[in-house]
Image (cartoon, grey):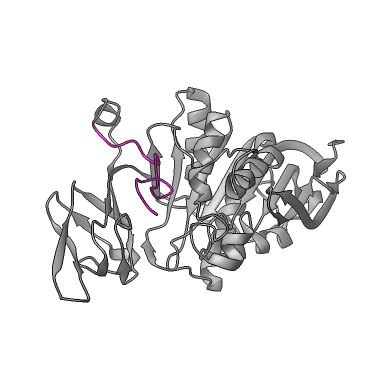
Amino acid sequence: MNDATLSVGSLHAEPGTKTRGTVGADLGTLTADIPLTLVNGTRPGPRVVITAGVHGGEFTPIDAVVRLAGLLEPGEVRGQVIICPVANPNAVYQGRLNVSPVDGVNINRVFPGDPDGGPTERLAAWLFAHLVDGADVYVDLHCGGIDQVLRDFVGYRLTGDPDLDKATAELAGSFGIEDVMIGLTAEGGNSHAAAARRGISAVLVEVGQRGQRDGATARRRVDGLLTALRHLGVLDPDGTTGADDPAPATVREWVWSAGVTSEATGLWYPEFSFDADIIGEVAEGDLLGRIVDPADGREHTVHAPAGGRIIYGMHGLTVRPGTELAALAIPWDPDTATRPNTLPVPGMGRGSDEADPRP
């Protein structure tokens, strides 16, 4: 039997119970109310932490984890599950952007945070200290934002620990998503990279685009989470929670080949499709699109710096220098990818959750 109380701040869940509420995070100049659901199972098992709402304008992950929180029953759970549907309230409720309106910082570039830093750095540190650091498994949910088309994918980072990397690769393949993006190092300020550096099996899951909040996409994401929880042993394989597991997907492994950013301010007219299901392949030097100056009509052409498949791209019209326009990936080839300086290191600056750079 599980006899451990699950506690986060002032919230407590005894074995066999589920508790929902908020916990205040002290950010120095303000306090953020972090909503949480604690599900403490009756039987021993792993502690799994699931976050959404790290970025504003990404609605489907929030919808999905709220649905998941309603479905999970402590009597069916092994171990403990902590669900945080809105990890970054200021960005979600005020900015609807990747950056917080409080200080202009993208929290997914500063993990594991700094308890003595600015508000967003303090929030990152709070999330790690109170949620992530106690986890066996960490799942951070994202989607293409309100200005972004995106192919569904799961991402994780290689750590050099063969047992941890194997467990995380198997977790990444359990969501029923075909495309798995492999980061070649665990460096950078992304949440799952910082967790991986601490020995936690951590994945980034991206499902949906343009800030979707439709029910079908949310249900598809819930089904993937339930499948992953069954894979982890948190739920029984023949449990009644949620839908039946989908047929396993054929996993295709990729590594990032390039991130394409704007060098001009203007209006973005891409050459690639806005349909995420048919975003295509490009060769090095191919035309990706044009940036048009609305004042005088001058054009700045944008070409692919490397070949690869477009995994996500800019859907918004207005861009400025540093705005990410597209991210490209190539099939995983360990012999090529492990040679130094062959590929850019993912997630190392203002980049996307995996590629560099996204604002």
Residue 345 relative to residue 6: left or right: left
Point out residue 274 in the picture as x, y percentages from the top left corner.
30, 69
Q: Single out the residue that lies furthest toward the front.
A: 29
Residue 75 counted in the magenta span: no
Which residue occupies the foreground of this view, 33 or 133? 33
Camera-side residue of 279 and 319: 319
- The residue positioned 48% from the left and 30% from the top of the image is 165
- The one nearer the camera, 348 or 251, is 348
Q: Is residue 214 left or right of residue 129?
A: left
Residue 124 image position (x, y, % from top left): 60, 44
Please provide percent x and percent y for residue 249: 43, 51
Is 357 within the magenta?
yes
Task: Write the start and end of the magenta stretch as one range.
Answer: 342-359
Q: Residue at x 84, y 48 (%)?
A: 10
Q: Taken as a whole, is the magenta stretch helix, strand or loop?
A: loop
Q: Disc count in the image?
A: 0
The quarter of the rendered structure image containing the N terminus is: top right
Image quadrant where residue 122 sits: top right
- Residue at image x 86%, y 43%? 15
For residue 280, side relative to residue 119 (left or right): left
Q: Is residue 204 above or below residue 164?
A: below
Q: Position of residue 358 (x, y in %)?
A: 37, 52
Residue 356 in the image: above or below residue 201: below
- The quadrant of the image that shows the C terminus is bottom left
